[in-house]
Amino acid sequence: MTNRVVITGMGIVCPVGNDVGSTWRALLAGASGMAGTTIFDATTFPSTFGAEVKDYDFTMFTENPQLHACANRGTRFAIGATAQACRQAGIEIETDKPGDGIDRRRMGIYLGAGEGSVDNDNFFGAIASAWDDENHQMDWSAWARVAFGKMGPMVELEQEPNMPASHLAVFTGARGITRSCLTACAASTQAVGEATMLVRRGKADIMIAGGAHSMIHPLGVSGFNRLTALSTRNDSPRTASRPFSASRDGFVLGEGAAIVILESLDSAKKRGVEILAELLGFGSSSDAFRVTDMHEEARGAVQAMEAALADANISYKDIDYISTHGTATSENDSIETLAIKKVFKERAKNVPASSPKSMFGHLIGAAGCAELITCVLAIRDNVLPPTINLTDPDPQLDLDYVPNKARKAKVDTAMSESFGFGGQNNVLIVRRYRE
Amino acid sequence: MNGRRVVITGLGAISPLGMTAQDLWAGLISAGCGIDTIKAFDPAGFNCKLAGEAPEFKVQKYLPKSYRKAAKLMCRDIELSVVAADEAVRDSGFITGAIDAENINIDPARTAINIGAGVISCDLVELAPAVARSITDGVFDIRKWGTDGLENLTPIWLLKYLPNMLACHVGIIHDIQGPSNSITCGEASGHLAISEAAEVIGRGDADAALAGGCEAKVNPIVMLRQCLLKRATSENNDNPETACRPFDADAKGCVFGEGAGMVVLEDFDNAVGRGAKIYAEVAGVGSSNNINPAYEHQEPDGKGIQIAIETALADAGISPQDLDLIIPHGTGILADDLAEATAIQNILGSATENTVVWPTKSMLSNTGAASGALDLIAAARAIDEGKIGAAKNCDNKAPGCRLNIAKQILQKNIRYALCCSYTFGGQTAAVILKKVNGKT
């Protein structure tokens, strides 16, 4: 016996909005979340800008901020997104005695979450004080002296990627299956997909699933800059994320959290909560090609898309909208376009396929679930979020990317794609709920 | 498990006890010890100077010729996973492209991979020259890092340290094209990755999977973190063999280490059909978490651990009395050991005194994300051999611990073995293995 799985709550904290309503309005208006980096001094970095979450105060979402005092940025975003999602789904949080009728042992957590930032000044300071550059040698005792003197246990602990899930356990009281994964840019798509499988197979009634991540820290930006993966359009951050355009030059690093409440249809009906959409299909694959490049023939991407269609038991003809991975790297946009052509065949040019990353940037671990939420909203309102900055289309890329302006369209079924660095591909299919 | 039956048909391990799964088993059964003074760096400035380090090896030896260049993309964690995966695949009898491209006998698209990983701490020596070029007036200067420092990092620097790269490299080496995941739940990662891979096969999304956990914790940053958290022992530095004492009254903390444990999981009918050796069946899995804002510790009553075990028992459809062996997480942190003991005692009730508990970290050290996978390999071998080893360093049980800690080597028919784990942060996991008799 398998359960139908539905979405009964959604929450988001991202560079264009700190809740679902404001985020969706911004996306439909074609807003950009990019600006000069403020989290640290990036003025001399190859990329001096990013897509930061703005004016966010996690203490607005919790009555017990002291329980999350050392939480990293990603975790703080997750708390806000989870509070919103739980409120919508009628799940009581921060209580020992919930009156919502949900068995906490049947409610789990599955996050695609990232590591926290290192304790920058002390981290770099300890290295600087102990390194003998001439002899290329570290004096580990000197390093330890500085590190033990300056670094704190909880700030160190909060760098571990399982910690966002740990805070959400305390925040929500969930005692069911708990997992966290970090498949790079595909992590929260994978988390939602695997969580869906757990509900479908009766291992949980409710899963709090999604992602949380911030890599806008010196080592994160340095790492992506060295890979030449980031846009360096420093003179114009708002037009820097240019998926599918000829002048695209990389992604814009974003941050945030996105959470959905996945629930068995029976549980949702029993509780009488509003059903926002049905999570219909999930497909996962690996490129098994190179850690530095996507498979040239889009083998892994195609396999994940086809696996999701098969899992949903529908045909490519049933998809009304594709939320692309659409990072605006030269490679991704070309290969993703190829993948869509292979899977959608004669329909490829007629299925609208846009990239919200043009507006909120690349949320890395949190990206996939943020984009899934836009799919649910597209279905709800029958409107497609645009790909902004598509003023000079790449002549090789000839699909309908919903350029520059949101568009009304009948959307019942949408596909959301995520392709992680290293070749882990994950695809979700979500459909308008009907009995 | 509901769905198709899933069995273990290949084992691979690199650990402080040696280069192979056989070394691991031989070391555990003879109460050996892989813990010693740290060699990877000078530990004089650290409270804990001990670790479990794996033997030296060259990863190139485990890479097909066509992939040897990629060795420069691999941090230590990735190298460990490559070694263990190579052994597990060979042991299973599957022939992947990496082993013999002419005689491949596995369908890449129907094979999954799931490798649990820890946060990968970067190599500070690799980073230091860049930092050294970013100093103004003796202080690290982020602006100088931007202009002069970061260009000293190798372009692929970030890719070496993403925790999903274990699964990506191993997947490329063995041409695994099916579902791929990287569980990152600290010390519970190994069990959770294997649990999920079993589910993927159980629900029919793959016929075989390579799954496990790997982590290289002998790193100054990890040691600093664990010392700051007071999880690492600061005693017995002169007497490494006695340092880690799970469930002992004198337990003073963890010793950390490195390793990788990988298993080949397979659909039961598939395994029988090709005449593969079956070590054990994955009969049930469970997980939960602590609700404990003291994030570095377990709840004193072990509730999160208890729920994981109860869920696994229900999933396996057995009662606690059916368990013939328990390999606990048992870190040697007294409070956490007592929490785990409480959880197990609550579940076993009157069966506590009859159920043998065999902690391994006194011999292996705490290898983080690898630990659960290494324990599961030990349990699979124990079932296969009908043998349980003696615990090490549990001379006087801690007050409150009523577990039947293994005192000597036992010959015993093991029907079901339970492995459980938990992590700082609070996620918990339990996996139950079952003895498979012939083709039933």
Image: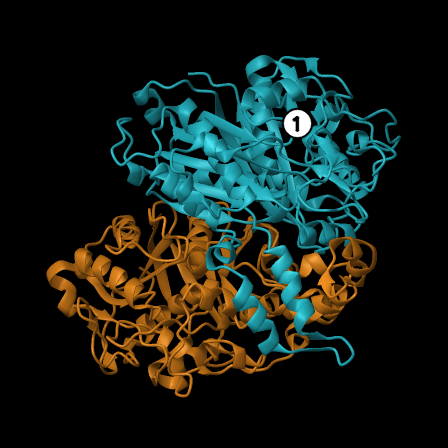
Q: Is residue A416 left or right of residue A230?
A: left
Residue B155 x %, y %: 78, 59
Relative to A400, say whether A185 is above or below: below
Subunit of label 1: A
Q: Which chain did the renderer colour orange?
A: B
Q: Nearer the viewer, residue B210 or B344?
A: B344
Residue type at tag 1: Ile
Provide residue A171's location: percent of width, then percent of height.
Answer: 38, 38
Q: Give left or right: position of B309 versus A141.
A: left
Quadrant into which the C terminus of chain B falls: bottom left
What colour scheme does the image use? by chain
Which residue occupies 71% across, 49% down?
A: A221
* Rendering colour (chain A): cyan
Between B198 and B60, the one lying in front of the other is B60
Name the element at disc 1: strand
Q: Which residue is mark 1?
A: A322
Residue at 55%, 23% (x, y): give it. A20
**In-image side of A243 versus B172 (left or right):** right
